[in-house]
Image: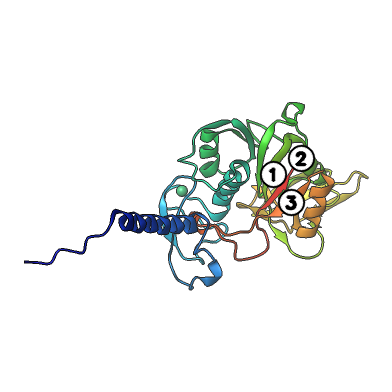
Amino acid sequence: MPESPPKRSPLANARILARRQALRLRAWHRWRDGGPGDPARIRPGTRIPFRCNLCGTANAGTLAELSREALTCAHCGSNVRFRAMAYLVTKEVLGAPLLLPGLPLRKDIAGVGLSDAMTYAAPLAEKFDYENTFYHTDPHLDIADIDASRVGRYDFLVASDVFEHVAPPVAPAFANARRMLKPGGKLVFTVPFTLDGETKEHFPELFDWSLTEDGGTWTLTNRTREGKRETFTDLVFHGGPGSTLEMRVFSLESLMREFAAAGFARVRIASEPYLPFGIHWPEPWSVPLVAYA
Ligand SMILES: [Zn+2]
C-alpha cells in the first residue's frame, strides 16, 4: 500500500497558508513599489515587463528602449514622459500610483492639461473632471494670460514640455499656474532643463515678432519694445520645423527660482523610477517636477 502523506494539523496548514499569502503579498508590494525596480541593478539588455498605466496593455522593453520620448507602449504609443504624467497625477492626487483603466470615477477632482498628448489626456478626462486645453485652438488656454474663471479651480495641472515654448517673459506663466490651483493643488511639470548655469533665453527682447520660411530656412523677425529690429535664423523647433519654437533652455536652478517667485510652497524632483509602469529616468536632467501650491 502506498504511504499516505503525513497528516498536518489544521494549525500547521493555516500557518503554511498564511506564509504563502504573506510571500505573495510581499511580491505584489515589491512589484507595486517599483522593486526589484532599482534600474541600476538590472543587467543591460534585460527585458523588463511593464504595464502601460494609460491603456493597461502589458509590454516589455529594455531600459535603453524605455527612453523619455520613444513610443514604447505597443497599444497606445505612450512614452516614458506620458506615462510619468499619469503616474504622478495618481500618486500625488490620489496618494498611490494607479493604472488609469482600473480607476474608479473621480469626477470630484478637477484637473487641466496644457496641450497634453491624447494618449494620456483621454484616459484622464474619462476618470477625472479634467479638461485638455490648447494655445492655438479650443478649448483655449494661454498660460501667460489666463481667464479669471480658471483661478483657484484645480486640484492638478499638467504642463509637459510647454513652458519652454511660452513667449518671454515666462514668469507670468508660472504665476498663473500657481493661481489656477486650489490650496494644496499640484503642478505636474516637465521641460527640458540643464543642471548648471542660468536659463538661456533665445529671444529675450521678443515683442512684435513673426516667423517666415524660405526654402526650408526659418527666420524669426522681431521688433523690440524699443523699436529695434532683430532677425534670428538659428531656430530650434520641437515636433518639426514651424510647429513649436523653442524660446529657451531652462536650468534647474532658474526653474526653482521661478516656482518660488510664483508662490509655490515647495518643489519635488520626481525622478523616481517606477518600473511596473515602464518609467525610469537614467539622466538627472529634464526629469519631471511636482510643484505644490
Ligand atoms: Zn498604452
- Rounded to the nearest angstrom, the CA distance separating label 3 from label 2 is 12 Å
Instruction: Answer above or below: position of 85 versus 34.
Output: above
Residue 97 drawn at (x, y percent): 55, 48
Q: Nearer the viewer, residue 248 or 178?
A: 178
Q: Earlier in the sequence, mark 1 or mark 2?
A: 2
Residue sitting at x 75%, y 31%: 151
Q: Which residue is mark 3?
A: 267
Give the image quarter of residue 197.
Answer: bottom right
Q: Which residue is mark 1?
A: 187
Q: Are marks 1 and 2 in contact (CB under 8 Å)?
A: yes
- Rounded to the nearest angstrom, the CA distance separating label 1 from label 2 is 8 Å
The residue furthest bottom is: 43
Q: Nearer the viewer, residue 267 or 210?
A: 267
Q: Secondary structure at mark 2?
A: helix
Q: Amino acid at mark 3?
A: Val
Q: Secondary structure at mark 3?
A: strand
- Rounded to the nearest angstrom, the CA distance separating label 1 from label 3 is 9 Å
Give the image quarter of residue 182.
Answer: top right
Instruction: Answer above or below: position of 44 versus 93.
Output: below
Q: Residues within 10 Å of mark 3 (few under 14, many from 20)?
A: some
